[in-house]
Image (cartoon, grey):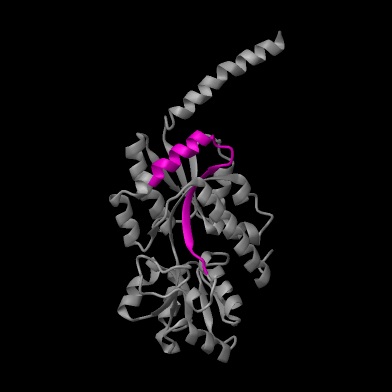
């Protein structure tokens, strides 16, 4: 009798669960961003959220929870109900921090379900004009001639610009010293003043200063030239295989029902095709990405392998 009662209860719950998924979203959805207001991650989340609120008929609310290279936000979302109502603006920073500190309470691959890659951009390799270099080959030659005398500005330990600089040293066999700051803006201040000589930075931070001639852009860190800056070479054109980028994509707690993931993925991809969404993102130096959940999962796996090798080679694991 008890077994029969349990079976009946489960059968009754099944249609309710299916209905809840088909009706998704039936209440506001929260998108947690691990970086502060005005960041590329925040901009991506807010512009896409505004469109989703219109197309899916429920409010998509963006909340900023900065800290720990976005691991504070990641831990919050990983512990949230697996129902699609709490999402994370995922980034490569979460992967990197998890590899540097294996003791962290969150693991990108295990704790999250990929939804859609949204935006991305290369880190721009810039130098102070006093270096006299005009391309990547000349920078490498200068660094080899002055080992330990040039400085990389980093936006913080474990950030994408920091790790891109570490990869550059490994790939070019140079010894440019890393100097850590609280963010790209602070590092830029010292680069403009000539107190440091080299920096990898998000395009949005340095574009106006490149245009004014205060600093010089040498290359982008992405494997292919950016559509927003097609005349800027890639580092990989000098160091074959060099390919890193900042990227931001939507993820949900692992175990979120597939119909919910699929509905979100389709809606986000559609939003990214809308010019009202794409225009402000491109204006901030971000490239529109999109794609399937499987494609995003493959990117996450590839990034994990690459940064694990770099972290080991640079001796950064804690």
Image quarter of the C terminus: bottom right
Residue 89 x, y percent position in the rendering: 48, 50
Query: In percent of the image, x 39 and y 58: which residue is there?
Result: 38
Instruction: Residue 176 in the image: state x and y as whole percent.
Output: 57, 81
Position of the N terminus by quadrant:
top right
Residue 268 highlighted magenta (yes or no): yes
Residue in the picture at 66% in, 15% down: 6
Check residue 133 for magenta coloring.
Answer: no
User: Which one is nearer the viewer's eye here, 219 or 206?
Assistant: 219
- Residue that lies at the very extreme toward the top in this rendered image: 1
Magenta-tinted stretch: 243-269
Q: Is residue 282 above or below residue 252?
A: below
Residue 146 visible at all: no
Q: Quadrant of residue 279?
A: bottom left
Relative placement, left or right, of 53 versus 303 is: left
Residue 21, can we see it? yes
Q: Position of residue 33 (x, y in %)?
A: 47, 50
Q: Which quadrant of the structure image shows residue 225?
A: bottom left
């Amino acid at each position: 009798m008890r077994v029969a009662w349990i079976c009946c209860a489960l059968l009754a719950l099944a249609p309710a669960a299916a209905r809840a998924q088909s009706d998704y979203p039936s209440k506001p959805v929260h998108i947690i961003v691990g970086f502060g207001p005005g960041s590329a991650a925040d901009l991506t989340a807010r512009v896409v959220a505004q469109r989703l609120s219109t197309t899916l008929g429920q409010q998509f609310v963006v909340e900023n929870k900065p800290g720990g290279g976005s691991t504070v936000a990641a831990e919050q979302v990983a512990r949230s109900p697996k129902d699609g109502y709490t999402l994370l603006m995922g980034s490569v920073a979460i992967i990197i921090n998890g590899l540097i500190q294996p003791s962290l309470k969150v693991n990108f691959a295990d704790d999250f379900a990929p939804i859609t890659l949204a935006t991305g951009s290369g880190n721009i390799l810039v130098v102070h004009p006093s270096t006299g270099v005009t391309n990547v080959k000349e920078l490498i030659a200068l660094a080899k001639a002055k080992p330990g005398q040039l400085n990389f500005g980093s936006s913080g330990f474990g950030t994408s610009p920091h790790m891109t600089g570490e990869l550059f040293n490994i790939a070019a066999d140079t010894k440019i010293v890393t100097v850590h700051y609280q963010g790209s803006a602070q590092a830029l201040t010292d680069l403009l003043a000539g107190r440091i000589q080299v920096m990898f930075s998000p395009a949005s931070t340095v574009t106006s200063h490149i245009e004014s001639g205060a600093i010089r852009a040498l290359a982008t860190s992405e494997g292919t030239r950016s559509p927003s800056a097609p005349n800027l070479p890639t580092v990989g054109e000098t160091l074959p295989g060099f390919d890193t980028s900042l990227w931001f994509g939507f993820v949900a707690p692992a175990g979120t029902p597939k119909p919910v993931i699929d509905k979100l993925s389709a809606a986000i991809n559609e939003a990214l095709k809308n010019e009202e969404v794409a225009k402000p993102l491109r204006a901030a130096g971000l490239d529109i990405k999109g794609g399937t959940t499987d494609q995003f999962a493959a990117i996450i796996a590839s990034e994990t392998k690459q940064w694990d090798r770099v972290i080991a080679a640079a001796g950064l694991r804690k």
